[in-house]
Image: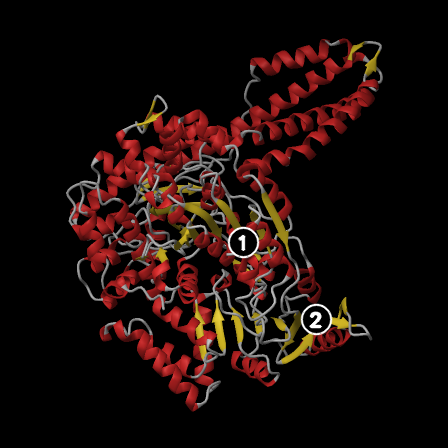
Amino acid sequence: MSFAQFRGQFSFALDDFQVTACQALQDGYAVLVCAPTGSGKTVVGEFAVHLALAAGEKCFYTTPIKALSNQKYNDLVARFGADRVGLLTGDNSVNGNAPIVVMTTEVLRNMLYVGSDALAGLGYVVMDEVHYLGDRFRGAVWEEVIIHLPAAVRLVSLSATVSNAEEFGEWLISVRGHTKVVVHEQRPVPLSQHLLVGTRLFDLFGTQSDGAAKTTLDPALMRYLNDRVQQQRRPSRGWRPPYRPDVITALDNDGLLPVITFIFSRAGCDAAVQQCVRSGLRLTNESEQARIEAVIEARIASVAAEDLDVLGYWDWRAGLLRGTAAHHAGMVPVFKQTVEELFVQGLVRAVFATETLALGINMPARTVVLERLTKFNGQSHADLTAGEYTQLTGRAGRRGIDVEGHAVVLWTPEVEPGRVAGLASTRTYPLRSSFRPSYNMAVNLVGQMGQVAARELLESSFAQFQADRGTHGIAAQIRRNAIALAEHKKQLICDRGDFTEYAALRRKLGDREAQLSREKARTRTVDVIQSLEALTVGDVIRVPSGRRAGLAVVLDPGVPPGKRADPHSGTDPRPLVVTEARWGGRLSMVDFPTAVDVLGHVRIPKQVSYRSPQDRRDLAARVRELNLPPAEPVTRRGGADDDELVRLRTALRTHPCHACPDRELHARWGERYTRLVKENDGLQHRIDGRTGSLGRTFDRICELLQRRGYLAEERTTPAGRQLARIWSESDLVVAECLRTGAWDGLSSPELAAVVSSVVYEPRREEYLVERMPSAEVHRALAATRAVWAQIVAQEDDLGLPKTREPQLGFVWPVFRWASGSRLDTAIAATVETGAEMPAGDFIRWCKQILDLLEQLAAAPIPARAAAQAIRRGVVAQNVMS
């Protein structure tokens, strides 16, 4: 089919960037299309589908998340018919041999590694949301696919706007051949920026008399904020966050609904809906409520009645009927997809969502509201980047419906209008690679092409491409430093001798003194840790300094069982004590500048609490009854200098330049010279570290795999071939548990419980109960942890990133579920372990365990039976239409 025929199918004229990209595809090029959210990039992907069908070839359409795959599947079915479109995700397999198949990117990666027959006849691959390549957790998958796709396959890469599109395009050309880069920066619907102060909406920027946009802040906004700040300084006047129903009402009065309000908290999203319901806010009429109810009834028909309460069905339904809803990863899929459907139909007019909604799901709104400009990034609360701000506000403005979209930031005392203006006007969103080789990747590549060729292939990654380009600026700095060094050297000329040599002696002497100081501090730290690790319950010690100085009795040594403390790992002992001054709490390394001695011992009752004032008084009295002598004054003893230090000092004093009258002047130039030499050495080290860095990491991974028997003489062993079929962040731990028999002898529910430990990741710190489902589960988990510890020790030895630690927070809940318990019983078990997760998270973790169990189907363990035990009820539901 020609492009002219294709564009004739649309009722609207295509934009220039769409035309340019489609014509490049028709001319035989691969394309990279970078354009704002909602601008119509998928038209280019659909043209690739047309070209594939016309040529009798296949087209795979990949997306980063299952929800987007489901949505795209429905779109393509509506356009091409169900018989020509398939779907492959971790949850669904529909018509997988169709000429058009929608899939998650991981599915295509796995196909490439196993050499799937489905790749035969593949002509095009569309990679939607390809900027996801920068995701630090899953981004490597995109690079793997791009590198490994057969050369004849044309790649259609669709990306949000990134500022280094040309750099990314250069890399695509280097690995895929002829590729056209098409960049379009204009939004299809203009976006107005606002600040909402209370319930009063202000434009963020002022306008010129001719109506053209300005980049200066609106004067009316600044005057109002200044007056408001002055009012809040008066007694009894303080700032209160705006009442969410009032915010929605204010936007509704201004004609700015439908709205998506981004709240970076699942609980916050749910609370916002409840707040709106309790306030009596209603955004729907009777006719709309009837339509909403019909959709709800159709969607939840397959959900067991006994599960409705635990799923929060009634609160969810009450919000929907009033036109409000939450949307986040903690919701069950059927609820999320119902919200999406009702929002697109215009029946839900206010959605409170987490940032996951910004990942390509088709839910455009007239207005987007940001409640805060910070969010939790998995490690800490961090400010939004300009790229994140643009991605979130990109939902505002519906093409063909709205004249303009509206981005609204709620004002708080911490929000500076200038900062909002900076986020709204910045156009620099660089794409950075997150690629790194894994154990699974290594055995797959070595199995296909050998270690040497695999290493060369990895060095063609975007990560290495960026690392190599990053060395150009460093090399230029080295050259500039070399010129300065030549000038400095002229100032080091001394008639007494070689001052460069003398300066080097001074530098070595200083380095040796610093090294000895560090070694003493390290030895002292190790002594303190070892003395704390040796403590037992009831030991009486002396805290040498600080606010808690004095005698104390140990209630808990503060060292996890079987876990040795490491001065560099952040796992220092933190003993729980009660002092003779009747204070109770945990001490840290700061309280012990020197090793601690045990001065005595008292018996500790079984039931004692350091929080109880009476218990603290009793314990303090027992300590005082020991009549221990007062502390002796601490004396610092100096140590003898080592031989190297003595030698350097002697060499310095006897050097001819030591007696030069201008010695200190020369020395200052020498210090400058030395600093530049050190700087250049460091810069060269950075270049050496970046050049071929992925190849060196790959070599270390292969060495570890050879040590453990997964590779031999550049070939995969039987164990390596099993590892090649395991797609998990803990792939090597799983493979070792299978190889060593750590998971043998488990029942289906027990296996599900143990497998959860290498899949589940807690969102917060959890308290873990000692109770285990069975002795066999306890044994298998101990063996799993032992395997992990061995692997981590070797990773540490080789300088590799450490495999994450097995987690126990989902063991008990999934055991209950796999044993046939009701959903409410299984979710109640998450409270017992401290995980306390909503039903949506419970289902998501169950499905991830299912994914891994299905990969282990060929292993001599009841993986299939365990998967079947999990795949029931709401976990088994898949809603696509």
Q: Can you say whether 493 is above or below 749 in the image?
A: above
For disc 1, the marked residue is: 158
Report whether 817 appears left or right of 616.
Answer: left
Which residue: 49% across, 85% down? 283
Identify residue type, mark 1. Answer: Leu
Q: Position of residue 460 (x, y in %)?
A: 53, 34
Q: Where is residue 733 in the image (x, y as percent from the top left)?
A: 31, 39
Q: Position of residue 132 (x, y in %)?
A: 51, 51
Q: Which of 321 and 263 is in front in this view?
A: 321
| Mark 1 residue crowding within 10 angstroms, few (<14) / some (14–19) / many (20+) | many
For disc 2, the marked residue is: 204
Identify residue type, mark 2. Answer: Leu
Q: In which quarter of the image is the C terminus?
A: bottom left
Residue depth check, mark 1 versus mark 2: number of the one nearer the observer: 1
Report whether 772 appears left or right of 765.
Answer: left
Q: Can residue 597 be seen in this view?
A: no
Q: Can you say whether 620 is above or below 396 in the image?
A: above
